[in-house]
Image (tube, rainbow, N blue to C red):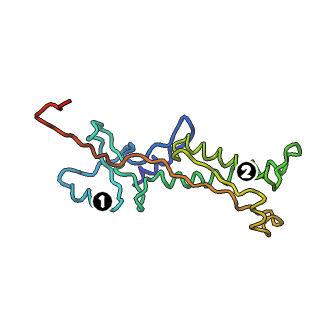
Amino acid sequence: MRRPFYRLMQYNPSASNRVTPFAFGYIYGVTPFPTRGNNALLTTLKNANTNIVGTGAEGGISNTIILWGTTEDGHDFTYWYSVDWVQINSDEMISNAIINGSNNPQNPLYYDQNGINRLQAVEQQVMNNAIAFGLALAPVTVTATPFATYVVQNPTDYPAGIYRGLAVTYTPQRGFIQIVFYVNVTSFPAAG
């Protein structure tokens, strides 16, 4: 199915153009899979994380949509999009800070506590953008091992210019796949 990849290629994350969930996204120029009489097969496909083209008829929408929008591991496709985006942008922005800090005599970037703090702030901005762009669930905190602690624990890293103390744990943002809604009906008015 090429159409879902076309949809994927339309992502251009920004604060005003947030990444939408892949599940139930509109796709065009395709014929929906017949759902009438295929409930067992549809359940099997959904449980196997196999996407199909469906319609938005259940929601009163006539467009064709991607049903479930998952990868084979069951995550919404935007889960892995988010992971890739964070890795690529973290590398680029930290590299940018290091290169610029190596070429700015008014504000050089040194391997000390101040330098670590600056790199931590760069990564925190990347993660703040991930939240603003719809790629990460807030809050996200970037941690950094303090300079003094790090060089004692890793005595060969400082002479080599290596720092492995930045870390972030986050949850990619996702959409709904299924809603279970309960309705209680009674013949008697509620007492109260």
Disc 2 target residue: 119
Residue type marked 2: Leu
Q: Residue at x 64, y 51 (%)?
A: 142
- For marks 2 and 1, the one nearer the N-term is 1
The quarter of the rendered structure image containing the C terminus is top left
Residue that label 1 marks: 45
The reply, left or right, for residue 189 in relation to residue 92 is left
- Disc 1 packing (10 Å; few <14; some 14–19; many ≥20): some
In the image, residue 177 sits, relative to residue 157, either above or below, namely above
Does 154 sit above or below residue 103?
below
The single residue placed furthest to the left in the displayed view is 187
Residue extending farthest to the right is 105
Question: What is the total number of numbered labels drawn onto the structure image?
Answer: 2
* Element under disc 2: helix
Q: Are marks 2 and 1 in contact (CB under 8 Å)?
A: no
The vertical placement of 85 against 58, above or below, is below
Q: Is residue 165 left or right of residue 159?
A: left
Residue 186's image quarter?
top left
Crowding around mark 2 (Cα neighbors within 10 Å: few <14, some 14 to 19, many 20+) is many
Which element type, helix, strand or loop, lies under badge 1? helix
Quadrant of the image containing the N terminus: bottom left
Kindly identify the residue that appears in the image at 12 percent across and 33 percent down.
188
Q: At 42% across and 48% down in the image, what residue appears? A: 22
Residue 27 spot, x, y in % from top left: 38, 44
Q: Please name which of the two marks, 2 or 1, marks the residue nearer to the observer.
A: 2
Question: Which residue is most to the front?
Answer: 192
Taking the view exactly as shown, the residue that stands out farthest to the bottom is 156
Along the horizontal axis of the image, is 125 left or right of 75? right
How far, Cα to Cα, is label 2 from label 1?
45 Å
Which percent across, then down, holds residue 96?
Answer: 74, 49
Identify which amino acid the numbered label 1 is placed on: Leu
